Image (spheres, rainbow, N blue to C red):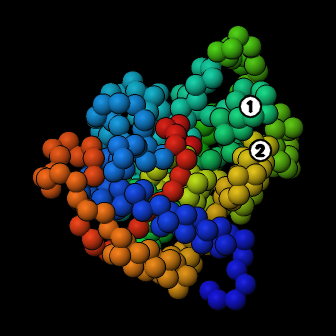
Amino acid sequence: MGGAFSAPTNNLIEEAKLFYGNKRLAYAVELWEKGENNTIVLSDGTNAPGTLPMKGEKFGKTVFQNDLQESLPIDSTMKIKTPEDGGTLIYETTGDLACKAFMPAGFRGGPTPNTMNPYRTDMGNPTGETPQNCATSWGHIVVIPVNHKIYNAITLTEEHLPLLAEMDRVGKVALKAISEGGVDMVGSLRWAMAQDSTIKMNDGRSVSSKLQNTEFVDDEAFLKCQSEGVDSVQDMVRDTTESTFHVGRAASVGYLHLHVRPTCFDLISKIGMDEQASEKGYIKQTLLDDVVSFVNSDEYATIKAQSEMLECESEPEPEGDDSDDDDGSALVRQASHRRSGGGLSRQGSRRD
């Protein structure tokens, strides 16, 4: 890197420094990422940001981690499942770099199809204060790794770069599937354009599901699709596709997840989310390429090296005996050793 940094790079640097300056969080994340603990619980007994806050066996787990997903019943709103089972899973792969690609869901404000985050502002953000409850765009795909526990983009190492490439590939395959899918495919472009029903919201309001051009940051693709058909915008979808991460505090779930979306169908809710992030001092969307460059950078290596030096100088002494907890619900190792990474995000269990 070197020289003056771009805004995304400065944001990555600041978010990494915030994480590595929070030794309790960083250490809890390290143990979870290495598989030594199955939850991310700090030494003071609090759950890490972006993990489940409910008491019991789920406390401190992340909603996307595989063992939790496998344990959830099929009717759970937290479970990633196919549209046939009431979910939004579009594509999944197998093997060491296995990934799942799905549309954001978990909306609680009303009975949207398969609990999808709504496109309409008056469904998810009627007061202007909750843009995060809406979809970022039509075609928004979330991709997670199945076999690799990684807390956030600022916990990545160079060894993870092949995984990032695979996540990007999987996301674009899933986007292509819903871009070209039929009208009966929940979440497809044809399906979205055909929506024209009324949904009774939990607050008693009745809201139309019909898409309007005023919902889009730029309505060119929507109007072209409306007048000339879905096939007419396939090139626009492909050419405007971006892959991004919510870095550090921008992430609502403490588990690495890539966002793939066609910016030609960005919704005004995205602007609201960007503005909220800016007011809090960070960037909401960071391009995959910027993250890859940062992972390879001297700046990132220096931040981690400085943190490790401080850790060695001020490692807390073990409290009580050093036997392991059977359920992994607390920090069970306090010996000094080199970190592989960690992250910092906001608490939340909604699938974003």
Front position in the image: 159 or 100:
159
User: Vertical placement of 81 versus 342: above or below?
Assistant: above
**Label 1 crowd bin: few (<14), some (14–19), many (20+), radius 10 Å:** some
Residue depicted at 35% across the width and 43% down the height: 45
Residue depicted at 42% across the width and 62% down the height: 23
Q: Which mark is residue 198?
A: none
User: Vertical placement of 206 versus 175: above or below?
Assistant: above
Left or right: residue 234 versus residue 157 is: right
User: Vertical placement of 265 versus 311: above or below?
Assistant: above
Q: Are marks 2 and 1 in contact (CB under 8 Å)?
A: yes
Q: Position of residue 219 (x, y in %)?
A: 85, 46
Residue 209, quarter of picture? top right
Q: Position of residue 301 (x, y in %)?
A: 47, 81
Outermost residue toward the bottom in this view: 3
Residue marked by disc 1: 125
Left or right: residue 13 versus residue 3 is: left
Q: Position of residue 206 (x, y in %)?
A: 74, 14
Left or right: residue 2 versus residue 29 is: right
Residue depicted at 64% across the width and 15% down the height: 202
Front position in the image: 144 or 330:
330
Q: Quadrant of the N terminus?
A: bottom right
Check disc 2 and report its element: helix, strand or loop.
helix
Q: Is residue 268 visible to us here?
A: yes
Residue depicted at 40% across the width and 27% down the height: 76
Q: Which mark is residue 272?
A: 2
**Label 2 crowd bin: few (<14), some (14–19), many (20+), radius 10 Å:** some
Disc with the residue nearer the chain's start (2 vs 1): 1
Q: Amino acid at mark 1?
A: Asn
What is the tally of numbered marks visible in this picture?
2
Q: Quadrant of the C terminus?
A: top right
Q: Is residue 186 visible to us here?
A: no
